[in-house]
Image (tube, grey):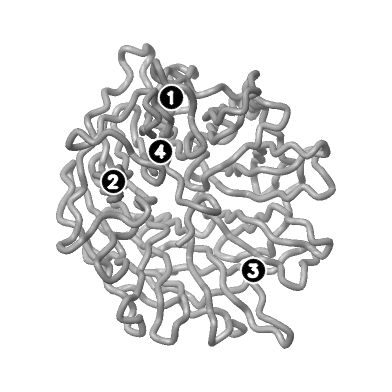
Amino acid sequence: MKFLRSTTLVAVLVTLATGVPATASSAPMWKNAKQVTLPRGAQGLPQGYLPTLTCVSPGNCEAGGAYATRSGVEGLILNEANGVWTAPLTLKAPGNAAIIAGVTIYGLSCGALGNCAAVGSYDDRAGNVEAFFANEVGKKWSAATQVTLPANAVGTGQNALLRSVSCSSAGSCSAVGDYQANNVLASRAVGFVTSEVHGTWQRASEISTTSTPNFNPLITLNQIACASSANCVAVGSFVDANNVTQGLLVSEIRGAWSRGVSLSLPLDASAYAGATLNEVACAKRSGCAVLGTFNTSTGAVEGLSASELDGVWSRANELTMPANAGVNPHVFLYGFMGIACAATGNCAAGGQYRDGAGNYQGFLDNEVAGTWESAVEVSLPNGAPSGGKNGGVITLTCPRSDSCRAGAAYLDGAGNYQALVVDEVNGAWMTGAKVVLPGGATTVGVDGGLYSLVCLTTSSCTGVGSFLRGSATYEGFTLAS
């Protein structure tokens, strides 16, 4: 399985809850993390994988991922009701699944309490990797269902998955992913979208682009966010006819998906910019913002953000890294929820960069009234040398424009990776606080961390992640304030 970096699922946690009170002393009090109860027979989380969390009200959340057994991997759903995490659920595989189905949930979203959708991939009996969706209706989960791919999908050797889903109301969701399409010369990697309308999932549609693509466009759709029902934005990348990777924007307007367009890059972008859009966030019933990376004309890898209002996207802005950044900061984004918006033009973003000494650090950046400020380095607890190669900011949440929460990972003085929460107070980021792990555990490991955190108010936050128990087994944890 491949989730984050090209070689490993990186450990990191990030969260940001906007709405911090006026003084640091009045910031939310984070409780110790609690170990997740897994289904009977579980042998931990594969690569510490517990990536997705959604909350409809304080104390009412659902999380998804996968858990390991002796024979393979099963889909995992966790449910919090009125502040209490209940018994875990194994997501039942589609009817054509292989005996060892490898069901993995990549995205989960709830349109209302007890009415949610999960998406991901599984292995069928013919040896193909297929995409699935599953619905919870009235607090009851159905078995997963295979996505009906576009008519040009290959029948043998398929490698399809849904990566992300966003539900604006019960029975109204949109999801994005990619699959292998037929061609007389060779199969092609292309993107697709599918929507749930009034509780029924529609047949998937292939995404086309306004720019001329390469023969194999290698379209990847990483994430989707919806400002309102049937009004969404999906982001990713594709390879154009000049063999250049472009950042891809695809919009759904009143239920109709438009052709994908390439994002206009900052003026100092290289002609071979290798741009990709990793993450997207939308303010409710308003505009959206995207986060990605590109190569400059000097070869530096920098971060970018762009905003949308009334369907029109601005030219991307290059994010200014902290003052100690190297000439090439090698900006890296984990692709979970590294951007969050409390309102149009008021967002926060985070990721990883390299400083002038070559150390990996986390960064946080704020957009205020439509203008991105210079990013700041994540302030670590005393004795911590750096964020580490598998550290930095991963996910953010902003209930209020000047009060967010961020989750990150960092290296402590003993060389162990730890999970970190960082509070923003009146627009200023505080020193991060180490997450106290369950059962005296000493590290989240290189693959664990706080993957997702949601703050619906400035004082009510929920997070999920994983930690290392023993030498090789990852267990899940929940976090609350």
What amino acid does circle 3 point to?
A: Ile
Residue appearing at x 35%, y 27% in the figure: 458
Q: Is residue 1 above or below residue 185?
A: above
- Residue hosting label 4: 13
Residue 236: percent from left, percent from top: 62, 55
Residue appearing at x 40%, y 46% in the figure: 447
How many neighbours does mark 3 have within 10 angstroms: few (below 14), some (14-19), or many (20 or more)?
some
Q: Quadrant of residue 326?
A: top right
What amino acid does circle 2 point to?
A: Ser
- Label located before the other in sequence (2 or 3): 3
**Residue 207: numbered disc:** 3
How many neighbours does mark 1 have within 10 angstroms: few (below 14), some (14-19), or many (20 or more)?
many
Closer to the eye: label 1 or 2: 2
- Residue hosting label 1: 403
- Circle 4: element type: loop
Closer to the eye: label 4 or 2: 2
What amino acid does circle 1 point to?
A: Ser
What amino acid does circle 4 point to?
A: Leu
- Residue hosting label 2: 471
Question: Which quadrant holds the N terminus?
Answer: bottom left
Distance of label 3 from label 1 (alpha carbons): 37 Å
Distance of label 4 from label 3 (alpha carbons): 32 Å
- Label located before the other in sequence (4 or 2): 4
Is 278 situated left or right of 37 in this image? right
Q: Nearer the viewer, residue 245 or 460?
A: 245
